[in-house]
Image (cartoon, grey):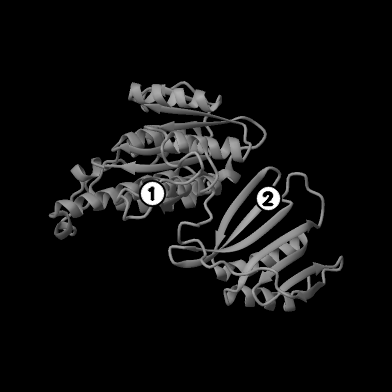
Amino acid sequence: MQTLELDTLLNGLVGQGVLIQGTFSQLRRSDPEGCSKVTIKPLELKGTLHYQFSSFCGNKVLHDNVLPEAAAARMIGLLEDTFRQALLQSEEADYQVLISKKGKAGILKKPPTKKRPAVLTHNRQKNYLLEEGTTVPFLVELGVMNAEGKVLASKYDKFKQINRFIELIADVVPYLPKGRTLQIVDFGCGKSYLTFALYYYLKELQGLDIRITGLDLKEDVIRHCSSLAERFGYDRLQFLVGDIADYNELQQVDMVVTLHACDTATDAALEKAVRWQADVILSVPCCQHELFRQVQSDVLAPLLQHGILKERFSALATDAIRAKLLDIVGYRTQLLEFIDMEHTPKNVLIRAVKGKQPNAAERAELARSYVEFRSFLQADPYLERALGDKLQPLPAPGRERG
């Protein structure tokens, strides 16, 4: 495709931050399972300009937030590979882009039809996947919004947390299996704000064939959540009383969620996920005490002698260990900010998607890096012991270094 003029236009609109909206349509070739349209809008995330790509695929809408330096190239790719036309709207002009059968880009400039919003998305008019003003039954019942869809001021942080969680879910939907019922387990579901959000987004908004099981030790909480699920007509959502380590009711699980499970309960959930070969793992750990009791290092003594610093360091080191162990057994793992630090210090989310098993050389390097880190801390992690058979020939924990 001849792209010089188009490349200049796109880079100018994106680089100068003047693009208000882009709409890409008219497929080059018929694809029943493909996306019929992609729209692009600017939004602000943590003070930084991004462009949100919304792909309309059947009855699903997939969102991806891209930095400006990558946005123009991605739009070029859409016109090279997928779409024949695009409408690019700025305050100064609209640009209609048409791609000929020979791949030549024709650009028609027209008077502007859109005005730039007064703000992007850093305030309360942010482009949430669950929008304020749209009544969501479970959010009304849980006291997050009123019957008119207005979010209650005292619950706005919870509303943002739920939307952030759904954003993280939306990113991993493409990694889930297609063409069958998806089995999802939420360990330690508690009051289930996020369990209901997970169900609502995947089943009601995305139309996926799912079954979700929420598990918690508190019988009164489970009774309440079960009654809500029945009231909402969420017939593919069940809640059970049970312990993570003892739960063996399912042979196959596609997604495992564990939010704020305490200490090694997180590791028990991660072990279950690995043994189920779950395609997606989402975990927000809580109160990681195990390493706090174990970590020793003369080098780190100035840090470890302060209880508050040792606690925070141990939590971060624990999550680093968990991520590396998941990498070794064939997952691609990220540590992400779940919600802003101002709301809670327990804001790290472990997100892992199943990939291909690393080859011998890759596995050896992952293991070497992990063992060196674990030995330096003189740690003996629960998750390593639990997954011992899958980590062979990983050397056993020792006391090589202090």
Q: Which of 270 and 188 is in front in this view?
A: 188
- 244 vs 212, left or right, is left
What is the x, y in percent for residue 8? Answer: 68, 78
Say which amino acid is labelled 1: Ala
Residue at (41% x, 27% y) in the render: 215
Residue at (49% x, 26% y) in the render: 229
Residue at (63% x, 55% y) in the render: 54
Say which amino acid is labelled 2: Phe
Q: Residues within 10 Å of mark 1 (few under 14, many from 20)?
A: few
- 230 vs 14, left or right, is left
Residue 16 quadrant:
bottom right
Assess whether mark 2 and mark 1 are in contact (beta carbons under 8 angstroms): no
One can see residue 244 in this view: yes
What is the x, y in percent for residue 108? Answer: 79, 74
- 42 vs 213, left or right, is right
Q: Mark 1 points at which residue?
A: 153
Q: Nearer the viewer, residue 85 or 365?
A: 85
Q: Mark 2 points at which residue?
A: 56
Secondary element at tag 1: helix
What is the x, y in percent for residue 3? Answer: 74, 74
Q: Which of 167 and 125 is in front in this view?
A: 125
Residue at (19% x, 58% y) in the render: 300
What is the x, y in percent for residue 147? Answer: 49, 38
- Closer to the observer: label 1 or label 2? 1
